[in-house]
Image (cartoon, rainbow, N blue to C red):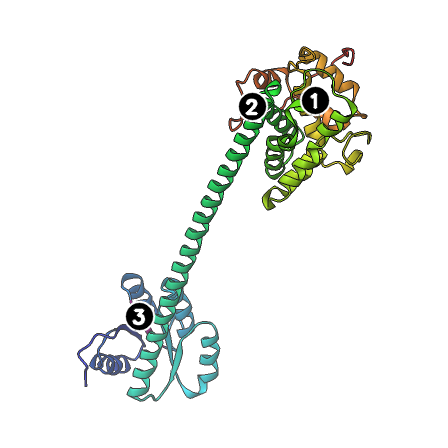
Amino acid sequence: MSTGKYIGRVLVVDDDQAICEILRAQLSNEGFDCEVALSAEEGLSMLRRDAFDAVLSDLHMPGLSGLDFLAAARRERPHVAFLLVTGEQDVRTAIQAMKSGVSDYVVKPFKGETVLRSVGQAIEKKRLEAELQGYRQKLEHMVEERTRQLFSALQEIEITYDSTLEALGGALDLRDSATAGHSIRVTLYALTIAEAMNCGEKQLRELARAASLHDIGKIGIPDAVLLKAGCLTAEEQAIMRSHVLVGYELVSRIAFLAQAAAIVRAHHERYDGAGYPAGVSGDRIPLGARIFAVADTLDAMTSDRPYRKALSFEEAMAEIVAQSGRQFDPVVVKAFLSVPRHVWSSIQTGSLSVGRPRPRAEAVAMPEQRARPD
């Protein structure tokens, strides 16, 4: 007896009209909305035109076989439940068909309750699969959205960190008025050289952070030493040099600044091993520190100091070339020389600042003359 409740829409495909009508009557009586097709071709046409929850197809039909029909039908309606009607001698074929995606099979001669149960179970299985797929897609979408939000938040935090470091570098410059603006300029000099060496974004980020913090250890240097206008005594030089290790100790305590801390510690090392605090040489010095050494020296030589006037850019360039292989890494010096003069000028004059796009380096000629070392 019919439940009076719609359960699902079923398409019966069989070349035997009597079987089609029997199945339609049984299914309709139990609340299914049932349509029939007397050939595989007609069944495909109906599937293209209308939506169904299940297809119940005979295995043997003239023209297109039941298996070929089901394969074509699944391409048209992949989310529909497909069932086979077969004789006892074809059970093995039906089982093979189930391995390729057929939901179930019904053996002739069949009982009405068997067909109803199989169709109902197949539709319910497909419904649950569709719900699971929808849930999975929703979950994937939620994960993607949360990932985007987390990535955006991390970017905001990183920007805040970097802005804080830049501000701290500026505050250090204000204490040492002789080098006002030094941190920003040396950061841009170092990044420009690093870009000319095709350093990756991670290396550029670490270098920028180290450049902002390279002199943070000077907060522990007494003003009498830090701001002294004349030459430092040997004792005062030792005090001044201590800022490297003080800075390293401060920066290395912050996990995300671990790589930057290594550059801070080594930024006064020399390529020939005559630097401090460890006297390491060559490739044992972090690449960022070797790049920074050229940038730092360039800014120091082209800035006015209490004990001397600034050198011209050409004089500073010649001195850096003269110290290639001694104070500086020759590879870094080569990259420095590859950057056009106007790029350095834009940094010196302040027309290029941290956070703005920097021109990529282009090849320039090696200077033919060297200025006398300071």
Q: Which class describes the residues within 10 Å of circle 2: few (<14), some (14-19), or many (20+)?
A: some
| Residues at discs 2 and 3 in contact (Cβ within 8 Å) | no
Q: Position of residue 240 (x, y in %)?
A: 71, 28
Which amino acid does the dot numbered 3 rest on? Asp
24 horizontally vs 299: left or right = left
Give the foreground label among 2 and 1.
Answer: 2
Quote the CA–CA distance across marks 2 and 3. 76 Å
The first of marks 1 and 3 along the sequence is 3
Quote the CA–CA distance across marks 2 and 1. 19 Å
| SS assignment at label 1 | helix
Which quadrant would residue 318 be assigned to in this image?
A: top right
Q: Nearer the viewer, residue 178 or 18?
A: 178
Whether residue 24 appears in magenta in the rendering, the answer is no
Q: Nearer the viewer, residue 339 or 210?
A: 210
Which amino acid does the dot numbered 2 rest on? Leu
Q: Position of residue 333 (x, y in %)?
A: 73, 24
Residue lying farthest to the left in this orientation: 4
Q: Nearer the viewer, residue 285 or 44?
A: 285
- Residues rendered magenta in the picture: 52-57
372 horizontally vs 24: left or right = right
Q: Which class describes the residues within 10 Å of circle 1: few (<14), some (14-19), or many (20+)?
A: some
Q: Which residue is identified by label 1?
A: 297
Task: Decide: is 42 above or below 61.
Answer: above
Residue 174, labelled with which disc? Answer: 2
Q: Which residue is identified by label 3?
A: 53
| SS assignment at label 2 | helix
Is residue 359 visible in the rendered image? The answer is no
Q: Which class describes the residues within 10 Å of circle 3: few (<14), some (14-19), or many (20+)?
A: many
**Principal secondary structure, stretch drawn in magenta:** strand
Q: Quadrant of the C terminus?
A: top right
Q: Nearer the viewer, residue 352 or 132?
A: 352
